[in-house]
């Protein structure tokens, strides 16, 4: 269900959707539309075909002309429908293993340029600092304007260890800049997890692969072995999508009932509904889901389902907005047709197409710089001060250390998510006040 963008080296996994219509499936014309072929238009096509074959400056075979016509026909529909030659079709099938060759970026086309949908974690692209939304305008000094997506991808492919120079245009930058990346074999780890603080877990899903649901289950069990889970951050930032069923499986882990996602199209095969089962492993754990402009397709399914069921608070920035479904129809000679056949909808009937998921709490990327801390006099500095009644150690101003949160400085959005989870936990389980307490006002002069 991932966007029909390209990994550099392969098609994105989710394009296959695990939905395959056989060639025998009836693709009926829209009701009321004439069933006969437009003969005048076919005559025009035949005439153009013959004139190109006879008059073009270089000799072109009939096969080349017909394949170009097919590609052009699909390219005129939408950015996600495509004709897959044997190599591209093989890439599509292999990619669900999570291993492929290239740079580690999801890309699409925008205004004739290559647009980065998302860099993939722990890849040359991520390590070089490529960001979602970057426009690649040159490849090894060659302008990409006028290239097809397939042609640009072929240029970025290559033997692992070889280098390629990308010229990048980034929003906020005054001028394009160059980055040199070394191609590598990309092995995508679908799920990563760690404890942010005791009781607060972090789950990073980089891409939705076939076994992502099982990996999330194992990660949560591992977190629970360390401490009771008071809250969980699910990080879907720069997650370009993946397998539809994996998005359903992950959503199902946090929902006990109800609709997760449904699709609607013109043919019966394209209409599907996915409902939550009773296998939720964390039905009550407070959740914050992080999204951004690189969160697409399957990521938006998860965020939309949890948002509509009020199961999680969505935080970050608007998602990508890829809400269409591509079905892969195998053809003869190891080729395939990838065709947009439906739109998907969240449980409340929202179409994400070209709009995306709007977070409940908008938090932009930022760098937090702690203010300089005052070094005034404290009670513990006064001569003859009383000790702490509970036996705690004195904290004079001379021993103060500047309070710096590495998390706040390194990842402000994640820092805010953690802060929100703490607030949710405190509001649900407020700490009891002491049975007796005595309060005295400080001396005043």
Image (spheres, grey):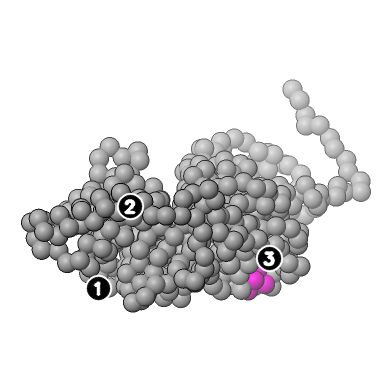
Category of crowding for the residue at label 2, using alpha-carbon neighbours closer than 10 angstroms: few (below 14), some (14–19), many (at least 20):
few
Please name the residue shown 20% across and 57% down the image. 49
Q: Mark 2 = which residue?
A: 39
Q: Label 1 belongs to which residue?
A: 159
- x%, y% of residue 417? 61, 50
Name the secondary structure under disc 2: helix
Task: Please identify, in this view, whether the residue under mark 3 or under mark 2 is nearer the observer.
Answer: 2
Considering depth in this image, is 64 or 364 the residue closer to the camera? 64
Q: Was residue 200 drawn as part of the magenta stretch in this picture?
A: no
Q: Position of residue 286 (x, y in %)?
A: 71, 55
Give whichever of discs 2 and 1 has the lower sequence position: 2
In the displayed structure, 83 sits above or below 436; it is below
Percent from the top left, x then y, of residue 276? Answer: 71, 63
Q: Main secondary structure of the magenta part?
A: helix
Q: Is residue 180 left or right of residue 285?
A: left
Q: Of all residues shown, which one is farthest toward the right?
A: 435
Q: Give the residue at x 39% y 72%.
A: 331
The quarter holding residue 339 reads: bottom left
Mark 3 lies on residue: 253
Q: Which stretch appears magenta? A: 217-221
Quadrant where the C terminus sits is top right
2 and 1 marks in contact (CB < 8 Å): no
* 284 on left or right of 164: right
Q: Residues within 10 Å of mark 3 (few under 14, many from 20)?
A: many
Q: Are marks 3 and 1 in contact (CB under 8 Å)?
A: no
Circles 3, 2 touching at the beta carbon (< 8 Å) = no
Element at badge 3?
A: loop
């Amino acid at each position: 269900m991932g966007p029909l963008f390209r990994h550099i080296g392969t098609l994105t996994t989710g394009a296959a959707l695990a939905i395959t219509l056989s060639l025998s499936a009836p693709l009926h014309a829209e009701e009321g539309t004439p069933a006969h072929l437009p003969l005048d238009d076919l005559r025009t096509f035949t005439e153009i075909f013959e004139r190109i074959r006879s008059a073009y400056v270089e000799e072109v075979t009939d096969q080349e002309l017909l394949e170009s016509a097919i590609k052009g026909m699909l390219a005129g529909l939408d950015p996600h429908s495509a004709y897959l030659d044997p190599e591209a079709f093989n890439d599509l099938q292999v990619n669900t293993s999570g291993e492929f060759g290239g740079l580690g970026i999801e890309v699409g086309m925008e205004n004739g340029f290559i647009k980065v949908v998302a860099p993939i974690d722990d890849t040359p692209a991520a390590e070089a600092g490529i960001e979602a939304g970057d426009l690649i305008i040159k490849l090894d000094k060659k302008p990409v304007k006028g290239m097809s997506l397939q042609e640009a991808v072929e240029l970025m492919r290559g033997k692992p260890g070889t280098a390629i120079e990308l010229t990048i245009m980034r929003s906020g930058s005054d001028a394009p800049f160059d980055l040199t990346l070394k191609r590598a074999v990309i092995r995508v780890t679908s799920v990563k997890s760690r404890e942010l603080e005791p009781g607060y877990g972090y789950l990073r899903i980089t891409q939705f692969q076939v076994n992502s649901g099982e990996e999330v289950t194992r990660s949560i069990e591992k977190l629970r072995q360390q401490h009771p889970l008071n809250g969980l951050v699910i990080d879907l930032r720069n997650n370009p999508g993946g397998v539809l069923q994996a998005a359903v499986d992950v959503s199902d882990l946090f929902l006990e009932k109800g609709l997760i996602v449904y699709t609607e199209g013109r043919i019966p095969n394209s209409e599907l509904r996915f409902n939550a089962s009773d296998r939720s492993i964390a039905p009550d754990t407070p959740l914050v889901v992080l999204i951004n402009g690189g969160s697409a397709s399957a990521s938006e399914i998860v965020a939309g389902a949890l948002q509509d069921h009020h199961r999680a608070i969505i935080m970050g920035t608007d998602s990508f907005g890829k809400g269409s479904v591509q079905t892969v129809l195998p053809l003869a000679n190891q080729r395939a047709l990838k065709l947009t056949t439906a739109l998907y909808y969240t449980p409340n009937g929202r179409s994400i197409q070209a709009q995306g998921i709007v977070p409940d709490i908008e938090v932009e990327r930022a760098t937090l710089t702690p203010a300089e801390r005052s070094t005034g006099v404290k009670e513990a500095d006064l001569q003859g001060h009383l000790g702490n009644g509970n036996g705690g150690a004195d904290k004079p101003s001379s021993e103060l250390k500047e309070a710096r949160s590495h998390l706040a400085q390194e990842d402000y959005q994640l820092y805010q998510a953690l802060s929100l989870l703490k607030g949710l936990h405190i509001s649900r389980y407020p700490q009891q006040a002491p049975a007796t307490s005595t309060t005295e006002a400080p001396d005043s002069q």
